[in-house]
Amino acid sequence: MIKSKIKKAADVFLSTALIVTTIPLWSTSGSAEAASTVSGLKKVRTTAFSQNIRYPVYRSGFRYTSDTSGNSQFYYSDGYFSGSSSRYSTHLASFSMCLSLAGFSTGSGSGNGYGSSNISAMLKSFCKGNTIQISYPRPAFYGKADNISSIGYALGQRKILLKKKTSSGKLKSVSYTLIPVIIRGEGYGKEWAGNVTLGTSGEAQGFSDAASKVTAGVNAYVKKYHLKKKQLKFLITGYSRGGGAANLTAKRLSKKYGGSSVYAYDFEAAQAGLAGKGTYKNIHNVINSSDLVPYLAPAGMGFRRYGTDHTIQDGSGFSAKDSSKIIDDILLWSIGNTEGSYRKNYAEKLYSCEDGKQITQQQALQELLPMLNSMSGLKLAGFLLSVSDLGSRMKTLGFYDQTISSWKVLSDAEKTQIENRLWNLCTGYEDGEKQIYEEEGKTLPALPVSYLSASQRKTVQNLWPLLCNAMLSFAAGDQDGIDRKILSNNLLTMMSAHSAASNLQLVQSQDSYYSSK
Protein backbone atom coordinates (compact mmCIF):
# COMPACT_ATOMS: atom_id res chain seq x y z
CA MET A 1 0.00 0.00 0.00
CA ILE A 2 2.73 2.44 0.96
CA LYS A 3 4.81 1.39 -2.04
CA SER A 4 1.98 2.02 -4.51
CA LYS A 5 1.22 5.38 -2.92
CA ILE A 6 4.84 6.46 -3.23
CA LYS A 7 4.90 5.54 -6.92
CA LYS A 8 1.68 7.47 -7.53
CA ALA A 9 3.05 10.62 -5.89
CA ALA A 10 4.23 12.19 -9.14
CA ASP A 11 5.44 15.61 -8.20
CA VAL A 12 8.43 17.66 -7.20
CA PHE A 13 7.98 17.60 -3.45
CA LEU A 14 8.68 13.93 -2.83
CA SER A 15 12.02 13.82 -4.56
CA THR A 16 13.13 17.17 -3.22
CA ALA A 17 12.00 16.35 0.30
CA LEU A 18 13.98 13.13 0.02
CA ILE A 19 17.23 15.02 -0.44
CA VAL A 20 16.33 17.95 1.79
CA THR A 21 15.58 15.57 4.64
CA THR A 22 17.70 12.53 3.68
CA ILE A 23 16.91 11.18 7.11
CA PRO A 24 15.04 8.06 5.88
CA LEU A 25 18.22 7.07 4.06
CA TRP A 26 20.69 7.87 6.80
CA SER A 27 18.76 6.27 9.62
CA THR A 28 19.91 2.71 10.25
CA SER A 29 18.06 1.46 13.32
CA GLY A 30 16.36 2.59 16.48
CA SER A 31 16.10 0.84 19.84
CA ALA A 32 16.04 1.22 23.60
CA GLU A 33 18.61 0.22 26.15
CA ALA A 34 18.82 -3.41 27.24
CA ALA A 35 21.49 -5.64 28.70
CA SER A 36 23.60 -7.58 26.18
CA THR A 37 26.06 -10.35 26.79
CA VAL A 38 28.27 -12.49 24.58
CA SER A 39 30.32 -15.52 25.38
CA GLY A 40 34.09 -15.66 24.94
CA LEU A 41 35.78 -16.80 21.76
CA LYS A 42 35.29 -20.42 20.75
CA LYS A 43 37.83 -22.01 18.43
CA VAL A 44 36.07 -23.47 15.39
CA ARG A 45 38.82 -24.09 12.84
CA THR A 46 42.40 -23.45 11.75
CA THR A 47 42.93 -21.57 8.49
CA ALA A 48 45.93 -20.60 6.36
CA PHE A 49 46.49 -16.88 5.94
CA SER A 50 49.50 -14.90 4.66
CA GLN A 51 52.50 -17.02 3.55
CA ASN A 52 50.21 -20.05 4.00
CA ILE A 53 50.74 -19.91 7.76
CA ARG A 54 47.84 -21.31 9.76
CA TYR A 55 46.05 -19.50 12.60
CA PRO A 56 43.10 -20.47 14.81
CA VAL A 57 39.71 -18.99 13.86
CA TYR A 58 37.25 -18.23 16.65
CA ARG A 59 33.52 -17.58 16.78
CA SER A 60 31.33 -15.68 19.20
CA GLY A 61 28.05 -13.80 19.33
CA PHE A 62 27.20 -10.13 19.37
CA ARG A 63 24.16 -7.86 19.34
CA TYR A 64 23.47 -4.60 17.47
CA THR A 65 20.00 -3.77 18.79
CA SER A 66 18.54 -3.74 22.27
CA ASP A 67 16.65 -7.00 21.73
CA THR A 68 17.34 -10.40 20.22
CA SER A 69 16.28 -9.27 16.72
CA GLY A 70 19.81 -7.96 16.35
CA ASN A 71 21.67 -11.08 17.44
CA SER A 72 24.33 -12.45 15.11
CA GLN A 73 27.74 -14.12 15.13
CA PHE A 74 31.23 -13.00 14.24
CA TYR A 75 34.44 -14.81 13.34
CA TYR A 76 37.83 -13.59 14.48
CA SER A 77 41.46 -14.62 13.90
CA ASP A 78 44.81 -12.97 14.62
CA GLY A 79 45.66 -14.15 11.13
CA TYR A 80 43.48 -11.35 9.71
CA PHE A 81 46.41 -9.02 10.41
CA SER A 82 49.19 -11.19 9.00
CA GLY A 83 48.72 -9.94 5.44
CA SER A 84 48.95 -6.52 3.82
CA SER A 85 46.48 -3.90 5.01
CA SER A 86 46.04 -2.87 1.37
CA ARG A 87 44.58 -6.25 0.42
CA TYR A 88 40.81 -6.52 0.85
CA SER A 89 39.74 -9.42 3.06
CA THR A 90 36.14 -10.66 3.11
CA HIS A 91 36.81 -12.16 6.55
CA LEU A 92 38.10 -8.91 7.99
CA ALA A 93 35.28 -7.00 6.27
CA SER A 94 32.59 -9.10 7.94
CA PHE A 95 34.32 -8.90 11.34
CA SER A 96 34.61 -5.12 10.98
CA MET A 97 30.94 -4.88 9.99
CA CYS A 98 29.99 -6.76 13.16
CA LEU A 99 32.06 -4.34 15.24
CA SER A 100 30.47 -1.35 13.50
CA LEU A 101 26.94 -2.55 14.17
CA ALA A 102 27.71 -3.51 17.76
CA GLY A 103 28.93 0.08 18.03
CA PHE A 104 25.41 1.44 17.49
CA SER A 105 24.14 3.20 20.59
CA THR A 106 21.23 1.32 22.14
CA GLY A 107 19.57 4.57 23.06
CA SER A 108 19.76 5.34 26.77
CA GLY A 109 22.10 5.51 29.71
CA SER A 110 24.25 8.12 31.35
CA GLY A 111 27.80 9.26 31.69
CA ASN A 112 30.40 8.50 29.04
CA GLY A 113 29.02 5.08 28.17
CA TYR A 114 25.65 6.10 26.77
CA GLY A 115 24.07 3.11 25.02
CA SER A 116 27.39 1.25 24.75
CA SER A 117 26.42 -2.13 26.25
CA ASN A 118 26.61 -4.01 22.92
CA ILE A 119 30.06 -2.83 21.89
CA SER A 120 31.37 -3.25 25.44
CA ALA A 121 30.22 -6.87 25.46
CA MET A 122 31.70 -7.63 22.05
CA LEU A 123 35.06 -6.07 22.89
CA LYS A 124 35.22 -8.07 26.13
CA SER A 125 35.00 -11.27 24.09
CA PHE A 126 38.37 -10.75 22.42
CA CYS A 127 40.14 -7.82 24.15
CA LYS A 128 41.75 -7.55 27.55
CA GLY A 129 38.91 -6.30 29.74
CA ASN A 130 40.76 -3.62 31.70
CA THR A 131 42.01 -1.98 28.48
CA ILE A 132 38.56 -1.29 27.03
CA GLN A 133 37.84 2.43 26.85
CA ILE A 134 34.39 3.74 25.94
CA SER A 135 33.74 7.35 24.97
CA TYR A 136 30.02 7.46 24.21
CA PRO A 137 28.85 10.87 25.43
CA ARG A 138 25.11 11.29 25.77
CA PRO A 139 24.10 13.40 22.76
CA ALA A 140 21.59 16.21 22.66
CA PHE A 141 18.20 15.57 21.09
CA TYR A 142 15.61 17.64 19.27
CA GLY A 143 14.17 20.21 21.63
CA LYS A 144 17.10 19.83 24.05
CA ALA A 145 20.43 21.63 24.47
CA ASP A 146 22.24 22.22 21.20
CA ASN A 147 25.17 19.87 20.61
CA ILE A 148 25.95 18.58 17.13
CA SER A 149 29.69 18.09 17.42
CA SER A 150 29.94 15.11 19.79
CA ILE A 151 31.16 11.70 18.60
CA GLY A 152 31.21 8.30 20.24
CA TYR A 153 33.99 5.73 19.91
CA ALA A 154 35.29 2.61 21.64
CA LEU A 155 38.84 1.26 21.99
CA GLY A 156 40.46 -1.90 23.29
CA GLN A 157 43.64 -3.98 23.16
CA ARG A 158 44.50 -7.50 22.12
CA LYS A 159 47.98 -9.00 22.06
CA ILE A 160 48.52 -10.86 18.81
CA LEU A 161 51.46 -13.04 17.75
CA LEU A 162 52.09 -12.99 14.00
CA LYS A 163 54.34 -15.59 12.39
CA LYS A 164 56.52 -14.79 9.40
CA LYS A 165 58.77 -16.99 7.32
CA THR A 166 62.40 -15.99 7.19
CA SER A 167 64.60 -16.36 4.10
CA SER A 168 65.66 -19.77 5.40
CA GLY A 169 62.03 -20.91 5.59
CA LYS A 170 61.84 -20.90 9.38
CA LEU A 171 58.96 -19.24 11.24
CA LYS A 172 59.62 -16.08 13.22
CA SER A 173 57.06 -14.80 15.74
CA VAL A 174 56.49 -11.07 16.18
CA SER A 175 54.29 -9.62 18.92
CA TYR A 176 51.88 -6.74 18.21
CA THR A 177 49.16 -4.90 20.05
CA LEU A 178 45.91 -4.73 18.09
CA ILE A 179 43.75 -1.67 18.84
CA PRO A 180 40.19 -1.84 17.45
CA VAL A 181 38.67 1.63 16.96
CA ILE A 182 34.89 1.55 16.57
CA ILE A 183 33.05 4.81 15.82
CA ARG A 184 29.39 5.14 16.80
CA GLY A 185 27.14 5.05 13.74
CA GLU A 186 23.60 5.25 15.12
CA GLY A 187 21.68 6.51 18.15
CA TYR A 188 23.37 9.89 18.47
CA GLY A 189 20.52 12.41 18.36
CA LYS A 190 21.40 15.93 17.30
CA GLU A 191 24.90 14.80 16.43
CA TRP A 192 23.22 13.80 13.14
CA ALA A 193 23.38 17.44 12.08
CA GLY A 194 27.14 17.07 11.71
CA ASN A 195 26.39 15.06 8.55
CA VAL A 196 25.28 18.24 6.77
CA THR A 197 27.87 20.55 8.34
CA LEU A 198 30.13 20.85 5.30
CA GLY A 199 31.90 24.17 5.91
CA THR A 200 33.40 26.31 3.16
CA SER A 201 36.76 24.59 2.63
CA GLY A 202 38.71 21.44 3.43
CA GLU A 203 37.16 18.12 4.42
CA ALA A 204 33.47 18.06 5.34
CA GLN A 205 33.54 19.92 8.63
CA GLY A 206 31.16 17.76 10.67
CA PHE A 207 33.03 14.57 9.81
CA SER A 208 36.44 16.21 10.04
CA ASP A 209 35.77 17.54 13.54
CA ALA A 210 34.55 14.09 14.60
CA ALA A 211 37.61 12.34 13.12
CA SER A 212 39.95 14.77 14.84
CA LYS A 213 38.36 13.98 18.20
CA VAL A 214 38.64 10.23 17.64
CA THR A 215 42.25 10.57 16.46
CA ALA A 216 43.15 12.59 19.53
CA GLY A 217 41.50 9.94 21.71
CA VAL A 218 43.46 7.15 20.02
CA ASN A 219 46.76 9.01 20.39
CA ALA A 220 46.04 9.65 24.07
CA TYR A 221 45.21 5.95 24.50
CA VAL A 222 48.52 4.88 22.94
CA LYS A 223 50.36 7.28 25.21
CA LYS A 224 48.44 6.16 28.31
CA TYR A 225 49.49 2.54 27.86
CA HIS A 226 53.03 3.39 26.70
CA LEU A 227 52.54 1.42 23.48
CA LYS A 228 55.35 1.35 20.96
CA LYS A 229 54.53 2.65 17.49
CA LYS A 230 56.28 -0.15 15.60
CA GLN A 231 54.38 -2.82 17.52
CA LEU A 232 50.87 -1.50 16.84
CA LYS A 233 48.10 -2.66 14.53
CA PHE A 234 44.86 -0.67 14.23
CA LEU A 235 41.44 -1.75 12.98
CA ILE A 236 39.30 1.32 12.20
CA THR A 237 35.61 0.84 11.44
CA GLY A 238 32.23 2.54 11.45
CA TYR A 239 28.86 2.57 9.69
CA SER A 240 27.04 5.50 8.04
CA ARG A 241 28.06 8.65 9.95
CA GLY A 242 30.50 6.48 11.85
CA GLY A 243 31.80 5.22 8.51
CA GLY A 244 32.47 8.73 7.23
CA ALA A 245 34.32 9.61 10.44
CA ALA A 246 36.20 6.28 10.28
CA ASN A 247 37.36 7.06 6.74
CA LEU A 248 38.93 10.35 7.85
CA THR A 249 40.26 8.89 11.10
CA ALA A 250 41.99 6.10 9.16
CA LYS A 251 43.64 8.67 6.93
CA ARG A 252 44.95 10.57 9.97
CA LEU A 253 46.21 7.46 11.76
CA SER A 254 47.81 6.17 8.53
CA LYS A 255 49.85 9.37 8.27
CA LYS A 256 51.01 9.06 11.87
CA TYR A 257 51.56 5.31 12.26
CA GLY A 258 51.96 4.19 8.64
CA GLY A 259 49.42 2.65 6.31
CA SER A 260 50.81 -0.86 6.82
CA SER A 261 49.75 -0.68 10.49
CA VAL A 262 46.23 0.58 9.83
CA TYR A 263 43.47 -1.76 8.61
CA ALA A 264 40.39 0.32 7.85
CA TYR A 265 36.96 -0.95 6.82
CA ASP A 266 34.07 1.53 6.75
CA PHE A 267 30.51 0.90 5.62
CA GLU A 268 27.99 3.09 3.75
CA ALA A 269 30.26 6.06 4.46
CA ALA A 270 29.65 9.55 3.17
CA GLN A 271 32.17 11.31 0.92
CA ALA A 272 33.80 13.50 3.53
CA GLY A 273 37.36 13.71 2.24
CA LEU A 274 38.90 15.75 -0.57
CA ALA A 275 39.60 14.81 -4.16
CA GLY A 276 43.23 14.38 -5.16
CA LYS A 277 44.63 14.06 -1.64
CA GLY A 278 46.07 10.53 -1.80
CA THR A 279 44.68 7.07 -2.32
CA TYR A 280 45.32 5.34 1.03
CA LYS A 281 44.95 1.81 -0.32
CA ASN A 282 44.68 0.43 3.22
CA ILE A 283 41.27 2.12 3.61
CA HIS A 284 38.45 -0.06 2.31
CA ASN A 285 34.99 1.45 1.79
CA VAL A 286 32.19 -1.11 1.51
CA ILE A 287 29.27 0.37 -0.43
CA ASN A 288 25.82 -1.00 -1.26
CA SER A 289 25.29 -0.26 -4.97
CA SER A 290 21.76 1.06 -4.35
CA ASP A 291 22.58 3.33 -1.41
CA LEU A 292 22.57 7.05 -2.16
CA VAL A 293 24.12 8.01 1.19
CA PRO A 294 27.73 7.21 0.12
CA TYR A 295 27.39 9.95 -2.51
CA LEU A 296 26.81 12.62 0.11
CA ALA A 297 28.52 15.06 0.61
CA PRO A 298 28.20 16.03 -3.06
CA ALA A 299 31.00 15.24 -5.48
CA GLY A 300 30.29 18.56 -7.16
CA MET A 301 31.63 20.25 -4.04
CA GLY A 302 34.89 18.34 -4.42
CA PHE A 303 34.26 15.62 -1.83
CA ARG A 304 35.35 12.00 -2.05
CA ARG A 305 36.26 9.09 0.18
CA TYR A 306 39.86 8.17 0.84
CA GLY A 307 40.85 4.64 -0.11
CA THR A 308 39.21 2.06 -2.35
CA ASP A 309 35.47 1.47 -2.80
CA HIS A 310 34.23 -2.14 -2.76
CA THR A 311 30.68 -2.51 -4.06
CA ILE A 312 28.19 -5.05 -2.77
CA GLN A 313 25.11 -5.79 -4.89
CA ASP A 314 21.66 -6.06 -3.33
CA GLY A 315 20.03 -7.41 -6.49
CA SER A 316 17.81 -4.38 -7.12
CA GLY A 317 19.59 -3.36 -10.32
CA PHE A 318 19.48 0.30 -9.28
CA SER A 319 22.80 2.16 -9.34
CA ALA A 320 23.03 5.01 -6.87
CA LYS A 321 26.39 5.97 -8.36
CA ASP A 322 24.83 6.57 -11.77
CA SER A 323 22.13 8.68 -10.13
CA SER A 324 24.34 10.61 -7.72
CA LYS A 325 24.47 13.62 -10.06
CA ILE A 326 20.90 14.25 -8.93
CA ILE A 327 22.21 15.54 -5.64
CA ASP A 328 24.41 18.08 -7.36
CA ASP A 329 21.51 19.13 -9.60
CA ILE A 330 19.19 19.62 -6.65
CA LEU A 331 21.69 21.74 -4.76
CA LEU A 332 22.73 23.74 -7.81
CA TRP A 333 19.19 24.47 -8.88
CA SER A 334 17.86 25.15 -5.39
CA ILE A 335 20.73 27.42 -4.37
CA GLY A 336 21.03 28.93 -7.82
CA ASN A 337 24.79 29.25 -8.02
CA THR A 338 27.58 27.99 -10.23
CA GLU A 339 29.22 24.68 -9.38
CA GLY A 340 32.43 26.45 -8.47
CA SER A 341 30.80 28.46 -5.68
CA TYR A 342 27.85 26.53 -4.34
CA ARG A 343 29.69 24.88 -1.44
CA LYS A 344 30.60 28.31 -0.13
CA ASN A 345 27.08 29.58 -0.73
CA TYR A 346 25.57 26.50 0.93
CA ALA A 347 27.42 27.39 4.13
CA GLU A 348 27.36 31.20 3.89
CA LYS A 349 24.52 32.57 1.74
CA LEU A 350 21.68 33.88 3.93
CA TYR A 351 17.98 33.16 3.48
CA SER A 352 15.04 34.61 5.40
CA CYS A 353 12.98 32.53 7.83
CA GLU A 354 9.38 33.08 8.88
CA ASP A 355 10.51 34.75 12.12
CA GLY A 356 12.60 37.28 10.18
CA LYS A 357 15.98 35.79 11.04
CA GLN A 358 18.42 34.97 8.29
CA ILE A 359 20.20 31.62 8.18
CA THR A 360 22.15 29.52 5.70
CA GLN A 361 20.96 26.30 4.07
CA GLN A 362 23.50 24.50 6.23
CA GLN A 363 21.98 25.95 9.39
CA ALA A 364 18.47 25.13 8.17
CA LEU A 365 19.36 21.46 7.71
CA GLN A 366 21.15 21.40 11.07
CA GLU A 367 17.82 22.40 12.62
CA LEU A 368 15.45 20.39 10.43
CA LEU A 369 17.18 17.01 10.35
CA PRO A 370 17.39 16.39 14.11
CA MET A 371 13.68 17.19 14.19
CA LEU A 372 12.94 14.58 11.52
CA ASN A 373 15.21 12.10 13.28
CA SER A 374 13.09 12.53 16.41
CA MET A 375 9.93 11.36 14.61
CA SER A 376 8.68 7.79 14.61
CA GLY A 377 9.08 5.89 11.36
CA LEU A 378 5.34 5.91 10.59
CA LYS A 379 4.91 9.61 11.29
CA LEU A 380 8.00 10.48 9.26
CA ALA A 381 6.77 8.42 6.30
CA GLY A 382 3.34 10.01 6.57
CA PHE A 383 4.80 13.49 6.74
CA LEU A 384 7.00 12.98 3.67
CA LEU A 385 4.14 11.46 1.69
CA SER A 386 1.79 14.29 2.63
CA VAL A 387 4.41 16.83 1.60
CA SER A 388 4.78 14.97 -1.69
CA ASP A 389 1.04 15.31 -2.23
CA LEU A 390 1.39 19.11 -2.23
CA GLY A 391 2.58 18.95 -5.83
CA SER A 392 -0.48 16.94 -6.88
CA ARG A 393 -2.74 19.31 -4.97
CA MET A 394 -1.15 22.27 -6.76
CA LYS A 395 -2.02 20.58 -10.07
CA THR A 396 -5.56 19.82 -8.91
CA LEU A 397 -6.06 23.45 -7.89
CA GLY A 398 -4.60 24.66 -11.19
CA PHE A 399 -1.52 26.65 -10.21
CA TYR A 400 1.34 24.14 -10.53
CA ASP A 401 2.42 24.62 -14.17
CA GLN A 402 2.26 28.40 -14.08
CA THR A 403 4.18 28.52 -10.80
CA ILE A 404 6.99 26.29 -12.02
CA SER A 405 7.37 27.94 -15.43
CA SER A 406 7.57 31.43 -13.96
CA TRP A 407 9.30 30.77 -10.63
CA LYS A 408 12.71 32.07 -11.68
CA VAL A 409 11.34 35.45 -12.79
CA LEU A 410 8.82 36.07 -10.00
CA SER A 411 9.43 38.95 -7.63
CA ASP A 412 10.20 38.27 -3.97
CA ALA A 413 6.70 39.42 -3.04
CA GLU A 414 5.13 37.03 -5.56
CA LYS A 415 7.25 34.15 -4.31
CA THR A 416 6.26 34.92 -0.73
CA GLN A 417 2.61 34.84 -1.74
CA ILE A 418 2.97 31.37 -3.24
CA GLU A 419 5.01 30.11 -0.27
CA ASN A 420 2.26 31.33 2.07
CA ARG A 421 -0.39 29.59 -0.01
CA LEU A 422 1.54 26.35 0.11
CA TRP A 423 1.94 26.62 3.87
CA ASN A 424 -1.82 27.11 4.14
CA LEU A 425 -2.19 23.87 2.14
CA CYS A 426 -0.03 22.20 4.78
CA THR A 427 -2.47 23.20 7.48
CA GLY A 428 -5.87 22.94 5.74
CA TYR A 429 -7.85 22.51 2.52
CA GLU A 430 -8.82 25.34 0.19
CA ASP A 431 -12.46 26.11 -0.56
CA GLY A 432 -13.84 23.54 -2.96
CA GLU A 433 -10.79 21.28 -2.75
CA LYS A 434 -12.60 18.46 -0.97
CA GLN A 435 -15.39 18.57 -3.53
CA ILE A 436 -12.91 18.19 -6.42
CA TYR A 437 -11.48 15.00 -4.92
CA GLU A 438 -14.95 13.65 -4.13
CA GLU A 439 -16.14 14.25 -7.71
CA GLU A 440 -13.05 12.46 -9.10
CA GLY A 441 -13.45 9.58 -6.65
CA LYS A 442 -10.02 10.20 -5.14
CA THR A 443 -8.94 10.02 -1.52
CA LEU A 444 -8.34 13.40 0.05
CA PRO A 445 -4.60 13.84 0.77
CA ALA A 446 -3.50 14.07 4.38
CA LEU A 447 -2.27 17.37 5.80
CA PRO A 448 1.46 17.52 6.60
CA VAL A 449 0.92 19.24 9.96
CA SER A 450 -1.23 16.33 11.13
CA TYR A 451 1.99 14.35 11.63
CA LEU A 452 3.79 17.08 13.60
CA SER A 453 3.83 18.04 17.25
CA ALA A 454 3.49 21.70 18.19
CA SER A 455 7.27 22.18 18.41
CA GLN A 456 7.87 20.29 15.15
CA ARG A 457 5.25 22.40 13.40
CA LYS A 458 6.95 25.55 14.66
CA THR A 459 10.30 24.35 13.27
CA VAL A 460 8.90 23.52 9.84
CA GLN A 461 6.87 26.71 9.63
CA ASN A 462 9.88 28.87 10.48
CA LEU A 463 12.02 27.16 7.83
CA TRP A 464 9.23 26.98 5.27
CA PRO A 465 10.22 30.00 3.12
CA LEU A 466 13.72 28.59 2.67
CA LEU A 467 12.59 25.00 2.10
CA CYS A 468 9.76 25.98 -0.23
CA ASN A 469 12.06 28.17 -2.32
CA ALA A 470 14.57 25.31 -2.60
CA MET A 471 11.92 22.82 -3.70
CA LEU A 472 10.31 25.09 -6.28
CA SER A 473 13.69 26.23 -7.61
CA PHE A 474 14.63 22.59 -8.14
CA ALA A 475 11.32 21.93 -9.91
CA ALA A 476 11.91 24.92 -12.18
CA GLY A 477 15.36 23.60 -13.10
CA ASP A 478 14.15 20.04 -13.66
CA GLN A 479 11.03 20.65 -15.71
CA ASP A 480 11.37 17.39 -17.64
CA GLY A 481 11.06 15.52 -14.34
CA ILE A 482 13.87 13.03 -15.06
CA ASP A 483 15.62 13.45 -11.72
CA ARG A 484 12.34 13.39 -9.82
CA LYS A 485 11.26 10.17 -11.53
CA ILE A 486 14.55 8.44 -10.76
CA LEU A 487 14.25 9.34 -7.09
CA SER A 488 10.55 8.61 -6.63
CA ASN A 489 10.65 5.32 -8.57
CA ASN A 490 13.57 4.05 -6.50
CA LEU A 491 12.75 5.58 -3.13
CA LEU A 492 12.07 2.32 -1.32
CA THR A 493 15.15 0.70 -2.84
CA MET A 494 17.40 3.52 -1.64
CA MET A 495 15.86 3.51 1.82
CA SER A 496 16.34 -0.25 2.29
CA ALA A 497 19.85 -0.08 0.82
CA HIS A 498 21.05 1.78 3.92
CA SER A 499 19.59 -0.82 6.29
CA ALA A 500 22.21 -2.14 8.69
CA ALA A 501 20.59 -5.57 8.96
CA SER A 502 20.35 -6.16 5.21
CA ASN A 503 23.90 -4.93 4.57
CA LEU A 504 25.22 -7.16 7.35
CA GLN A 505 23.70 -10.14 5.53
CA LEU A 506 25.25 -9.06 2.23
CA VAL A 507 28.72 -8.68 3.74
CA GLN A 508 28.46 -11.97 5.65
CA SER A 509 27.34 -13.74 2.47
CA GLN A 510 30.73 -12.90 0.93
CA ASP A 511 32.58 -14.50 3.87
CA SER A 512 33.07 -18.26 3.40
CA TYR A 513 33.03 -18.80 7.16
CA TYR A 514 29.31 -18.02 7.26
CA SER A 515 28.42 -20.28 4.33
CA SER A 516 30.29 -23.21 5.87
CA LYS A 517 29.36 -22.83 9.54
Image: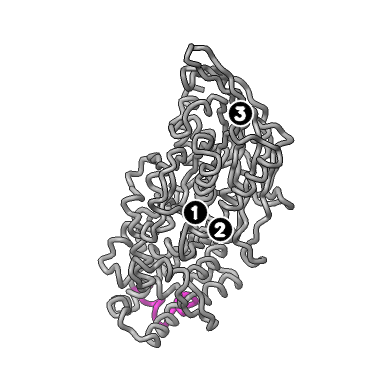
Q: Quadrant of residue 178?
A: top right
Tell me the residue that label 3 is attached to: 176
- Marker disc for residue 26: 1
**Quarter where residue 125 is shown:** top right
Q: CA distance from mark 3 to mark 1?
A: 36 Å
Q: Dot 1 surroundings within 10 Å: few (below 14), some, or many (20 or more)? A: many
Q: Nearer the N terminus, badge 2 or badge 1?
A: 1
Q: Is residue 492 visible?
A: no
The answer to whether residue 120 is above or below residue 446 is: above
Residue 78 appears in the figure: yes
Q: Label 2 sits on what residue type? A: Trp
Name the residue located 35 percent from the left edge and 44 percent from the top edge.
Answer: 316
Examine the structure image and report whether residue 430 is included in the region drawn in magenta: yes
Q: Position of residue 231 (x, y in %)?
A: 60, 31
In the depicted structure, whether residue 36 falls above or below residue 7: above
Q: CA distance from mark 2 to mark 1?
A: 9 Å
Report the residue marked by disc 2.
192
In the displayed image of the protein, which residue is found farthest to the front? Answer: 167
The region drawn magenta spans 424-439
Q: Which amino acid type is shown beneath numbered disc 1?
A: Trp
Specify which label sits upstream in the sequence, 2 or 3: 3
Predominant secondary structure, magenta span: helix
Q: Element under label 1?
A: helix
Left or right, 96 with respect to 221, comes to: left
